Image (cartoon, rainbow, N blue to C red):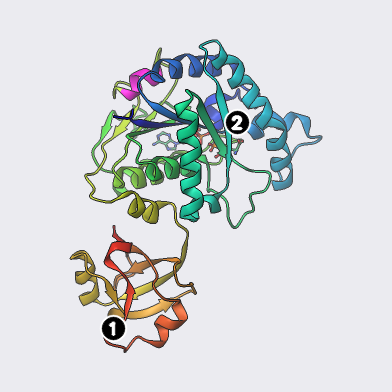
Amino acid sequence: MSKPIIVIKFGTASITHKTGELNEDILQEIARQISILHADYQIVMVSSGAVGAGRGFIQNYKGTISERKAAAAIGNPLLLAKYTQYFSKYGITVAQSLCERHHFANRNQFLQLKETYQELWKNGIIPIANENDVVSNLELKFSDNDELATLIATGFGADTLLLCTSVGGLLDADKNIIPFIPKVDSSVIGLANDDKSSLGLGGMISKLTYTRMATRMGTRVVIFGMKPEDGMLKAIDNQNGTSFAPEKVALNARQKWLASGSLIAGKVQVDAGASVALENRKSLLAVGIKKVMGSFEKGEVFEILDEKKNVIAIARARESSEVIADNLKTQNFEVANADEIVVL
Ligand SMILES: Nc1ncnc2c1ncn2[C@@H]1O[C@H](COP(=O)(O)OP(=O)(O)O)[C@@H](O)[C@H]1O
Ligand SMILES: N[C@@H](CCC(=O)OP(=O)(O)O)C(=O)O
């Protein structure tokens, strides 16, 4: 049996000093602890820090988008060189994987990423992913690397997603780390405010949003800090940070990808009868649709909203939004097949 997959994400605040320079002590610790986990898991690292590592080379850096892209272009090789250096102490080679959001939206391309990672794992190599900031445009980018890490974890069916944070875990109102959360609901998300580190993009709200997605797709999540000794090794044993229980799901890999990695091109609102049919895992028929919103092509993915406008499912369209809108009164007109609908 192949080893379980774990995805471990390090944000900017976790691996840089306040000034933005890389914190080499932490990088060495990351390499040491991951070298121990390497024996038992297939690992994907996701590391931010390129902008922080490169921004010192940009004159009068103010953090504009083009400056961030340029800083990432400079910082990425510096970051990788450090990881290469520290992992080599343990005889481990690392590989760079710069990803763009649209690679995840196209299932064939996503499967190619998986194939590449499998080839690397076969050779004992650890891929280190980061967003390809140099070309990512505002409309179509990952919201941050918490999202990138989550899409890799859910799309690969990872056992565990470890999200490293500078604050050690999810804190309660008294600033104590909450050790275990059985389910991420709105009261849990409400614990986080929108504070984030000066160079990062994510913060705790983003971590919790993606934690909810990952746990819904059956992946356990641990938000942890590197400050305690062996912090990562303890986190994987639920002994450090905040652990979030995975939900039991009966989704295949394709459906998990549909619900997380695909890009949502439009929406349809359905009536109460159609909502019930979807809950009972039936296909979506045009007669149950009240309204088609936005425009999508055949094969693209859309959200299904109930009468109260709550998102209740994600589906792949059998017809374009235009054709669907023209057939709302046609009997037995299938808009999405049950196999390609994920009820949330
Ligand atoms: N309830 C909370 N528990 C923990 N952190 C929180 C909470 N609410 C807001 N935060 C903020 O979220 C941020 C955690 O993310 P951090 O590790 O800094 O970012 P990144 O990994 O994205 O670089 C911190 O700035 C922290 O103050
Ligand atoms: N791609 C950017 C990081 C963007 C990002 O998501 O940052 P963070 O919120 O610190 O994980 C970089 O390498 O600096």
* Residue denoted by label 2: 49
Q: What segment is highlighted magenta in the picture?
A: 231-236
Q: Secondary structure at mark 1?
A: helix
| 117 and 105: which is toward the camera | 117
| 91 and 279: which is toward the camera | 91
| 35 and 306: which is toward the camera | 35
Q: Tell me what residue is drawn at x 53 percent, y 17 percent.
A: 26
Q: Tell me what residue is drawn at x 52 percent, y 30 percent.
A: 127
In the picture, measured across the screen, residue 40 lies left or right of residue 277, that is right
Question: Can I make out residue 88 in this image?
Answer: yes
* Residue denoted by label 1: 287
Q: Tell me what residue is drawn at x 48 percent, y 35 percent.
A: 117
Closer to the observer: label 2 or label 1?
Answer: 1
Answer yes or no: disc 2 within 8 Å of ligand 2: yes
Where residue 144 appears, x then y in whole percent?
Answer: 53, 43
Where residue 173 appears, x then y in whole percent?
Answer: 34, 34
Question: Can I make out residue 165 in this image?
Answer: no
Q: What amino acid is at disc 1?
A: Val
Rounded to the nearest angstrom, the CA distance separating label 2 from label 1 is: 50 Å
